[in-house]
Amino acid sequence: MAQIILENPWALSALVVAWFLLLLFAWRRRFRPFGPFLLRLTIVVLVALALAQPVFLPPQVDSQESRGRLVLLVDQSAGLGEAGRAALQAEARRLAGGSPDTVTLFFAGNTRLVPGFSATTPPAVGQVELDLDPEISNLAEALSVGAELLEGQAGRLVLLSDGVPTAGDALGAAARLARQNIPLDVLVVKEAERERWAGSANEVRLVGLEVPPTLRQGESFDIEVTAHALHPAEVTLSLARVSDDTVLAEDLVLLEPGFNLFTFEAEAELVGPQSYQALIAAAEDGQPINNSWFAFSQVFPPPQILVVGDELFQMSRFAGQLEEAGFSADRLRPEEVPARLSELEPYAGMVLLNVSARRLNLEQMIAIQEFVRSLGRGLVVTGGRDSFSLGGYEDTPLVELLPVSLEPPPREERPPVALLLIIDHSGSMVERRPTAAQPRPVTKLAMAKEAAIRATDILGPEDLIGVLMFDNQYEWVVPFQSVSDGAALLALQQAIATIPGGGGTRILQALEVALPALAEQDVASAARHAVLLTDGKSFDGDQGIEDYDLVVEAAQEADITLSTIAIGRGADEELLTHLAEVGRGRYHFAAEPEELPELTIAESDILRSNAVQEGEFQPSLSAPHPIVRGLFSDPTPAERFELGGYIALTPKPRSEVALQVGPGDPLLSVWGYGLGRVVAWATDTGQEWGTDLFAWPESSRFWGQLVGYTLPGPELGLLQVEVEVEPDGVVTLTADGVSSTGQTVEQAPTRATLVTPGGREITLSLRQIAPGRYQQRLRLPDAGAYRVSVTQTRLEEPDETVTTGFVWPYPAEYAIPAEGAGQSLLRELAARTGGRTFELGDVAVTGSESQSDPERGSPGAQELWPWLLLAALALWPVEIAWRRWSRLRIQ
C-alpha cells in the first residue's frame, strides 16, 4: 500500500496561526470578494504542506520471488549483554535460512560483513572472529553500509538491535533510506525477553559524581554520588581524590533497586585542577566496567575579604571564622575604608560588621556601592544597634544596595512606647562659637530643644514622653505624660522651648532621678528608652564608673535601654560610650549642634517603629537556598543557636529570603545588585543578640557559605581553555587567546600536553580556526580523569599557560538508557522508511510485504514539496488578478 510520510510534520502547526490571521482579515472585509478568499486559503495550505516536506512511498509488492536481496543488521554492542548478543545472532540465523540472497552485517562501533552466515554457521563466529568495538553502538553507520550492500538492487534491510545507539544520527540515516525507497524492518523485543537476557545476575553501576566545578582553597563542599542497582545489593563505596591518591571516604552501603544518592563532605585542600573518583565493589555484578565515575574541579587560591567594624575583638573573631572556612581576611575601621575603587579592587568581598552609616562619608559609601555594582564583588551587611535603620542607612547609597527595606513589616498593633530625654542645659550648651561656615551659629541647647520638640511629632497619642533638664541640679521640664494632639501637644512643646541655660554638669545625679522615673511608668508591653544629650564632663565628686553601672543595670532590669549623644569634642566620650554599651543602646557623636535633631529623631523613630525585636528567637529555613546548603534542614536539630534579638526589616520584591525569625521576619536575605551580590543578616555577629552563634558547631561553615555565596567566580586569564568530551570518547580542545589590550592573538604557536589516567603524556598542536581561536580534536584512549596544559607562545608578551582537567566516564554503552527510548526509536525508524516491526520468531517477517518491485513499475520515493510549492506560486498571480478584477466590477 502506498504511503505519504511527512519529514517535518511540525510545520503544519503554522496553518492554525495563518488561517486565524487570514480569517480575521477577511472578516473585517465581510469575506468580499469570496472567491479570492478561498483561493488565498488554498495557497496557505499548499505552502504549509510544502514546509512539512511530504514524501510519497509507492505501494509494495507481495511476491516472494521478487523480494530481492535481504540485508540483516545485527547489533553486537556491549549494552545487550552476552545473552542479548547471542539471542540476536540466533534470530539472524533463523531469518537468513539458507538463502544465497541474504547478507548478514554485524555492527557495534564498527561494522563487519559475514558472507554466508546462516543456520549452519558455527554459533561462536559472531562473538569470536568479528573484531568489533562493543563499547560503541553506531546504528547510523550500519544503516548506511547496509544500503550500500544493496548496490541499487531491489531489497530491504532488517535491523536486530536494542535501539539505543551511542554514536551517529540514526534518524538522518533513516531519512536517506526513505529517499532511496529502501524499507527498514525492525525487531521489537518485549520487556520480558529483555529481562530474560539480563538473567538473575544483579547489575550495579555508578551513574553520577557531582562536585562544584570551581572551588576556593580551604572551602568545604559536598560531593554527591549516584548509584543504580537492579536488585538490592550491599556494596563497598569509596571516594578518592585522584590528584594525590587520597582516599576521602570508604563505607559499606546498601543499594535499593533504582537510583541511590549519597552525599559526602570534603574540603578543597590543594590549589589547581583536582579530579575525583568514586568506586563501588559488589559481590555480584553483571558489568564491572561501569563501577567507577570521575569528576573534575578547579581549586583557586583563597579569596581576599575586607572585614569592616568598630570593635577589634568582634572583627578578629569574625575574621578567624572566615580563615577557618578558607578565606583570607583584612580588617579596617570604618574611617579607614578606601574611597577609591581602585584600592578596593584586590578584595573579592566585603563584610560590614554593625557599621553605622554615620561612620562613613559619602565617597566611601559610593565606593562600596560601585564595588558591588561595577566590579561584581560581594557584600555582607550584618545587623546590630549601629546598623540598618539604627545606623542611619536611610537616604544613603547603602540602602539601595540592600535586599531589604528598612521599614519593619506591618504589625497588627504596635504597643505603646515611653521615651525619656535627659538634656544637659549647662553653661557650655549656650556658648556661641562662630566659624567660617557659621558666622552666626545656633547654640547646642537650641538644637537639643529642637530635637526634643521634633521627637514629640513622631510619637503617637498612646505613647509617653518625659523631658528632664540638668546641670548642677535637675528639673522635670515635661513630667511623663501622653503625647496628645492640639493644645496639649503645643503646651508640651512650648515647655521644652523655654529650657534656659544653667551651670555645671552632673550626669550621675540626672540618671539616678530620670531612669527610676521611667521604670515607674505603667505602660504594659511598652518599650522604654532613654536618650542622654550632653556636651561636657560630669562633676559628680568621687563617684566612679561602678556607680554609673549600678544605676544603668537597675534600669536594665526594668527593660530600659539607654543611648547617649556626645555633643562636640568636650564631652566625656569614654563615659558616654560605656553607658550606651551597658544600657544596651547606641552611642552617637555630634560634631556640630546641627546634627542633634537628626540623631534624636533617629532614636525616637526607631522606638516608634519597633524595629528592634528582643526576646528568644530561633532561626528557621524560609526556603531552600544554596547559601544555607546542608544547614537548617533538620527541623529539630540537636544543636542550633538562639538569638536574643534582631532588627525587623522588610524584604524587597526581587530578594530571596533564606532564613526567617520571629513572626516570619527576614533574617538572612540575598539578591543580585548590578554585577555582584549582597546579603543582609538582620542580627549581629555576637556583640549582643547573637552570642550563641560562635558556639554553634557549624558557625565557621555557615559564615564561609554565606560570604562565599556573594563572591564572583575566579577571574579568567588571557588564555581560556574549553574542553568538550563526546560520548564516544572524542574530545575537542579549544583555546581562546587575547592580549593584555583585549585584542585577539593571531598565528601564535599553541601546544597542549594531555596526561592520561595512566600517566602517559600526549603532546599535540592546536591549529587556528578563527580569530584568536585555536582547536584540536582527538580520540581519548581510556576512560578516566585527564589533565591538560595549554601553552601559547606570544611575540610581544610573556607566554600564557593554562592547566585544567576533564573526565571521560565509562562509555555510554554501559549507561542506563531512558525508559522506552530504544523501542520508540525503532518504531520511528520503521515508520520513516515504510518498514514494519516484528517480534522474535515471527514467521511473517520472511515474506515480502514491505518490498517494492521494480519489475511491476513501482516508482521510487518521491519528494512532493517542490510540486506543492510550484502549485502555490502558480495560484498566486491568479488570486491577485481575480481580486483586482472583483474590485473593478464593484467600482
Image: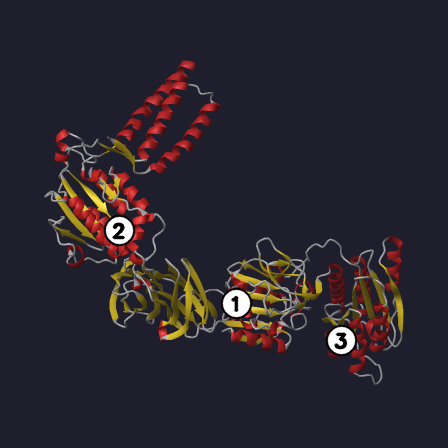
Q: Quadrant of the C terminus?
A: top left
| Above or below 106: residue 327 | below
Residue 296: image tag: none
- Residue 557 visible to an observer of this rendering: yes
First-in-chain label (2 vs 3): 2
Front residue of 334/312: it is 312
Name the side, left or right, on which 845 lies relative to 721: left
Amino acid bearing label 2: Gly
Quote the CA–CA distance across marks 3 and 1.
36 Å
Given this view, does label 2 or label 3 mark the residue nearer the observer? Answer: 2
The residue indicated by pointer 1 is: 705
**Looking at numbered disc 1 in the image, what kind of residue is underneath it?**
Gln
Between 510 and 361, the residue placed more toward the observer is 510
Of the residues tagged 3 and 1, which is closer to the observer? 1
Amino acid type, label 3: Leu
Report the side of 408 relative to 400 (left or right): right
Residue 557: where, in percent of width, then height?
A: 79, 72
Residue labelled with disc 2: 168
Element type at marker 3? helix
Disc sitting over residue 579 in the figure: 3
The answer to which quarter of the image holds residue 450 is bottom right
In what quadrant of the picture does the N terminus appear?
A: top left
Q: CA distance from mark 1 to mark 2?
A: 44 Å
